[in-house]
Amino acid sequence: MGPRVKDILLGLLPILLALLFTTGILLAVGASPWEAYRSILEGAFESPEKVADVVAACVPLILCGVGMCITFIAGQWNVGIEGQIILGAIFATWAARNLPWPRVPILTTMLLLGMLGGALWGFLAGLLKVYGKVHEIFGGLGLNYAAQGLAIWLIFNPWKPADGATMSGTDPFPDPAWMPRLGHLRVAPLAVILALLSVVVVYFLLRGTRWGLELKALGKNFRSAFLLGVPSTPRLLTAFAACGALAGLAGAIRCSARYGRMIPEISGGQGYLSLLVALLAGYRPQWVPLIALFFAALGVGSPRLELDLHLDSSLGGVLEASVVLAVMLVGGLRALLARRRAQVGMEEAA
């Protein structure tokens, strides 16, 4: 068996383990696993409208997942990506509310400002890490809460509708600030193009540039990379900013293409879910769209479980979590086997 075949089989093993685990749960509660999985698939792909919903749900996962690949490769857990989505949405909303321009310039400005907002929030997380010695997980979580508080304050104070603030968000954006959709379907072709373009750009940046090579060196061994002359501080800050820019773009797209307004829960947990997407993709941008499609299909199809089988739709979340745990388990076993092989090789050489 060739090494490539082994890699493919090992890549499929976590999914098989997760399916076995979920199947065991379904059997324990007396439900048919086959019917449950069929219901999820039908709920996600039974009509053009559902397929469009799945594709639309992929967009923020792809953008944020690709961004997470950048910081993961640099050895950083950018948990603050939720706040970066929110800041991107806030910056884009400001443009939609205050710039009475035609569609092309206003959409361009909203997307660019969204990237700027996310990049600034990501850069701030990097500053806390580098100069404040605050671990990126704790700093990111704190910035998430700060961003959420800022969004709620804006929605319930200066941006509240004329008839009073509600959890439904701000007034709808003017028509030029809405990203054009594909007919009656809830998917914006421009958003899909931008998400796929981000995969291509980040793939070549990480594989074909000195910047990407230096980020990988920092992720492998930070101190050794520093001693070899890698400018660690600038590289870490640019990694956080680049990830934040993609997350901010996702926030701007969710405002413009999905809701047409700013809502309190504009991030929708997409940042945390993209963390799982990047983990499953092995920090390789080219695999992010496929993993994002899997999570998006589960999210769109799971509600059918309640209608068809009277099962809680959270089963989809159980399947997602079990896949991630299986990936981590298989990854740990592979690392353990690799260390043992290396140890045996050294003993034989001695």
Image (cartoon, rainbow, N blue to C red):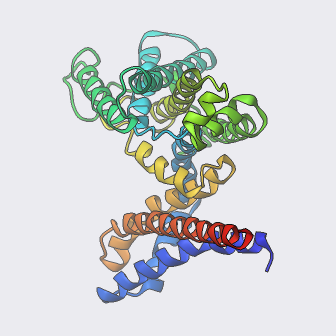
Front residue of this view, candidates 214 and 21? 214
Q: Could you tell whether 1 is left or right of 284 in the image?
A: right
Quadrant holding the C terminus? bottom right
Q: In which quadrant of the rendered view does residue 235 lie?
A: top right
Front residue of this view, candidates 153 and 175? 153
Residue 173 in the image: state x and y as whole percent. Answer: 43, 24
Q: Let me know if residue 327 appears in the view.
A: yes
Residue 262 in the image: state x and y as whole percent. Answer: 37, 29
Q: Check the image and report above or below for 183 versus 167.
A: below
Q: Let me know if residue 173 appears in the view.
A: no
Q: Could you tell whether 319 is left or right of 194 in the image?
A: left
Front residue of this view, candidates 2 and 13? 2
State the residue at coordinates (48%, 85%): 34
Residue 309 in the image: state x and y as whole percent. Answer: 35, 79
State the residue at coordinates (60%, 36%): 224
Quadrant holding the N terminus? bottom right
Q: Check the image and report above or below for 144 versus 229.
A: below
Q: Could you tell whether 71 is left or right of 345 in the image?
A: left
Q: Check the image and report above or below for 241 versus 310.
A: above
Residue 321 in the image: state x and y as whole percent. Answer: 41, 64
Front residue of this view, candidates 227 and 24? 227
Count of numbered labels shown in the rendering:
0
Q: Check the image and report above or below for 30 versus 45.
A: below
